[in-house]
Image (spheres, rainbow, N blue to C red):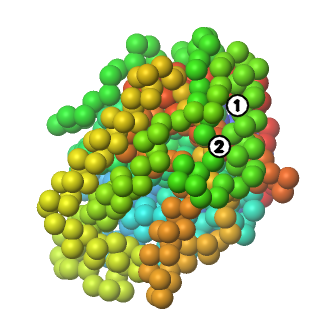
Amino acid sequence: MSSLADDTRWLDATAQADLVRTGQVSPPELLEAAIERIERIDPELNAVVIRWFDHAREVARGPLPDGPFRGVPTLLKDLWAHYAGQTLSNGCQVVKDAAPVSATDTTLVSRFRAAGFVVAGRTNSPEFGSLPTTEPTAWGPTRNPWDTGRSPGGSSGGSAAAVASGMVPLAHASDGGGSIRIPASACGLVGLKPSQGRITLGPYRDESNLGVELCVSRSLRDTAALLDAVRGPGVGDTMIAPAPTRPYVQELGADPGRLRIGLLDHHPFGGPVHEQCALAARETAALLESLGHHVEPEYPAAMRNTEFARRFGALWSTNMGASFARIAEQMGRDLVPGDVELVNWVQAEFARGVNGVEYALGLSANVEFRRAVQQWWHDGWDLLLTPTMAEPPVPIGSFRNDPENPMAPMLRAGQLCAFTPAFNSSGQPAISLPMHWTPEGLPVGVQLVAAYGREDVLFRVAAQLEAAQPWEHRRPSI
C-alpha cells in the first residue's frame, strides 16, 4: 500500500477534509488513496459491489463544491440512493442484470455532493434492505473486518465494512428498523439514526416511511458535521423535524447537565440477550453514573406491546410489496418467483392478502405506539440506554433462506433486533456507540435514544462517552 493510502487510512472525514483545505493533499490524490485501499482490502470483504472510479476521478479533478467535506472520498449504499448516471440494484439479482441507470440524484445524494464528497461507488446491501445482515444472492456476502467469518450486520453492512476496514472514512447508510445502528454495532462504528423528518427522503419517498438516512462513521464529529450539512426538508415534505438551535458540531463538548437515563438490559419480550451485550449496556450505565448522570432500570412499557408487533407486520410486508411494485414498473413486467429471494417473496405475497382496513389499522397502531413510547420522555426521562443488538456479530449464513420455513430469516432477525425497530416506529433519534469488545475481540455497541428532535442531547452525551472511553485506536487487523 502506498504511503498516502496508508497515512490516510484511519483519518476521519474531518481530518481528510482538513488536508485538502490546507493544500497538503489534493482531491485526486485522496481519491486514489481510497481506490488503492478498496482494491487491496475489498477482495476479502466484498463491501464495494458497484464501482465508478473513472467517473469519480473526473469529479475529483473538477470544480468541487466548497463544502465541509470537499475532496473526501465516500461510498453510497446500494439501496434507493439514486446517483444520476449510475446504476442501482437494491441488492436484487434481476435489477442487477437489467442495470438501470438513474436519471437524477435523490435529494440527499445531491447534498452529499454539495458537501464536497467524491462518490466512488456503492456498498453491498441485502435485497431491498430487509434483513439485519448483508448477504444478497445478487452480490454475495459482505464479511466483517473484525472476523471475516461473521456478518457486518445489515442492511448497511457494506458501508460499515468499508468504513471499519479503513477504505473510506464514512459512508452513506439508511435505517428502517436498525440498519444504521446494527452494522455500526457489529463493526465498531458510530451510527446515528436521525429523527424522522430530520433529513428529506425526496424526491421518490417521503417521511411517512419508517426509514431514515445518514451514515456510518468512525467519529462523532464526522456524524455531527454531516448532519449539519445535509439536514432539512425537501420540496413537498410534510413531516419536518424542528430545526436545531445551533450546529450539531457545537454540541460536542457542551455540558448536557445531569440527565435522567433509563436502562434496558434485557429483551423487552423476554427473549435471550447475550451476556456480552447486556454487560456492554451495564458498563456504559456505570460510566454515565461516574460522569454525573442518574441511571436506573426503566424503559417505556409500550416496548412490551406484542399486539403492536403483530400489527406492524402488515406495514412491513406492505412496504416490501410496494418495493416489488416499483421494481416491476421500472422493469416493465411483473416480478415472478425466482426473481427475488424467498423471504422477500413470501412477505410480498402476504401483503397481497392485507386489505385496506388492515393496513389502516396498522398505521393507527403505529401512531398509538409512537405516542405511548414518546410519553416516557415527556414524563421526565432524558435518554434510554440499551444494547444495540441482542447478540455480538453473528456467523455468515445465519439468515439463509429456507424453503421449508420461508420466514425463518425474519424470525431470526426478530431475535437479533430486540432494541432498534421501536424507534423507527416512534420516529426518535437513536445512536449506536462502540463501547465494548468481547473477549474474542468482537465489537458490541450500545444504543442511546433521545426524545423526538433532540439529536443535540445525543451528541452531548455521546461526546462525553467518546472522551471518557475513546474508541479511535481500536482497529481490525485486516
Residue 247 in percent (x, y) is at 46, 17
Q: Position of residue 94 (x, y in %)?
A: 35, 78
Please report the residue visible at 18 percent of the width from the left and 76 percent of the height from the top.
Answer: 332
Would you say 19 lies left or right of 291 here? left
SS type, badge 2: loop
Residue sitting at 75 percent across and 27 percent down?
287
Residue 358 visible from this viewpoint:
yes
Q: Residue 27 falls in which quadrant of the image?
A: top right
Q: Is residue 91 rendered to the left or right of residue 386?
A: left
**In front of the other: 68 or 160:** 160
Look at label 2 and name its amino acid.
Asp
**Residue 228 point in image, percent of width and height:** 44, 26
Q: Which residue is mark 2?
A: 265
Image position of 140 (left or right of 40): left
Q: Earlier in the sequence, mark 1 or mark 2?
A: 2
- Between 82 and 26, the one lying in front of the other is 82
Is disc 1 surrounded by few (<14), some (14 to 19) or many (20+) residues within 10 Å?
Answer: many
Residues at marks 1 and 2 touching, judged by CB atoms closer than 8 Å: yes
Tell me the residue at 56%/41% (across/down). 191
- The residue at which mark 1 appears reads as 285
Quarter occupied by the C terminus = bottom right
Q: Secondary structure at mark 1?
A: helix
**For residue 28, above or below residue 440:** above
Give me the C-alpha separation between circle 1 and circle 2: 10 Å
| Amino acid type at image mark 1 | Ala
Estimate the x, y position of residue 341 in percent, counting from the top left. 41, 78
Q: Residues within 10 Å of mark 2 (few under 14, many from 20)?
A: many
**Left or right: 320 in relation to 388:** left
Quarter of the image for the N terminus: give it.
Answer: bottom right
